[in-house]
Amino acid sequence: MERIEAMKIITESLNDELLICNIGFPSRELYSVKDSNTHFYMLGSMGMASSIGLGLALSQNRRVVVFDGDGSILMNMGTLATIYNQNPENFILVVFDNECYGSTGSQCTYAKTVDLGKVAKAIGFEKTFCFRDTIEFEQILKLKGPVFVHVKVDPGNADVPIIDLSPEDIKNRFIHEINKNRSF
Amino acid sequence: MDSSEAVYNALKEAEIDFIVSLPCINLGKLLEMVECDPEIIHVPVTREEEGFGIAAGAYFGGKNTAILMQNSGLGNSVNVLASLYELYKIPILMIISHRGTQGEPIIAQIPMGKATPDILKVLKIPYFNPKTSEEAFKTIKKAWDMAKTNGSGVAILLEISYW
Ligand SMILES: Cc1ncc(C[n+]2csc(CCOP(=O)(O)OP(=O)(O)O)c2C)c(N)n1
Ligand SMILES: [Mg+2]
């Protein structure tokens, strides 16, 4: 399956989780699959989705899911060590691994030869999962985090339009959503 | 009030409650104070860029955020400051040990030390250069208010002579 199919399956099983989505086609695809006040579309700053998700998870109680990519994880691999050490219970990192820089023309990444799931395990993540043809996300949502979810997908971007929200609108409605039912 | 206490007291005055950091020798005492403070969530990071990402998430989660870093880390963070902080108008207080300034013993610090103010200018990040503890205390609180009003980073450059 391609990334957009995997996104559909996972977003269908989400309830009120806060969702940070990676730069480029991943955010455009998520926006076209489903838009929600719980979504933060990261339009720039490649590599930062996992880190933004970590900061959000550490600063409030609601569960945070990050949709990240293999190229972006490789760019900011140090943050995996930070996530592991901070150990946030309410944090799920999903990596859509198409073994390429999908948004820029599907040039190969080193995820072809480096198993990112093994990297997460070596860092210390106790809960790591790898999905290929089927994704059972309900079981993931029952776990205490941090959880590392490696989803192997085929390269390919869906034919979806640019996101027609301004960065400030994306931010403001996201913060509003977080403040709405804050538990601490 | 010594130089580190002045910064710490100002962070408390500004109600900063989430700090990301990467050490500089001049930040040593301040980092210890921050680490011991139960009211502050302190996240040591592996790279300053990552720290800005984490702090942005914490800001969305309602925290008042600061980064403690060496000026060399500004070079590691240019893209996140432009394409996350400027793009979305996110505030952060940047407490920066400014190396490569008067009295620098390490030659490798000189080039980035010189470039630092210009990089901040290009990024349209306001910065202040307090010389004494009293000045730092007053400036830091104001800088955080300014960061919130502008929706941008505001930097405090603390030269070698400050400490
Ligand atoms: C610092 C930086 N370098 C390069 C780019 C160009 N770029 C945008 S998205 C992207 C690919 C990201 O790859 P990955 O995280 O694997 O996501 P995918 O699109 O494959 O799902 C690249 C290289 C950028 N925006 N910023
Ligand atoms: Mg990819």
Image: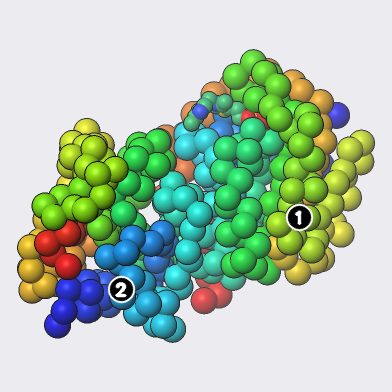
Which residue is found at the position 76% from the left and 36% from the top? A114
Q: Which residue lies furthest to the right in this view?
A: A133
* Label 1 secondary element: helix
User: Can you identify the residue that label 1 sits on?
Assistant: A122
Which residue is found at the position 56% from the left and 34% from the top? A23
Residue nearer the viewer, B88 or A106: A106
Ligand 1 within 8 Å of disc 1? The answer is no
Which numbered dot is residue A142? Answer: none
Distance from Cα at disc 1 to Cα at disc 2: 33 Å
In the rendered structure, which amino acid carries the disc numbered 1? Ala
Which residue is found at the position 65% from the left and 25% from the top? A101
Which residue is found at the position 45% from the left and 70% from the top? B42
Residue B146 point in image, percent of width and height: 19, 56
Q: In which quarter of the image is residue A161?
A: top right
User: Can you identify the residue that label 2 sits on?
Assistant: B30
Q: Which chain carries label 2?
A: B
Residue A100 point in image, percent of width and height: 70, 25
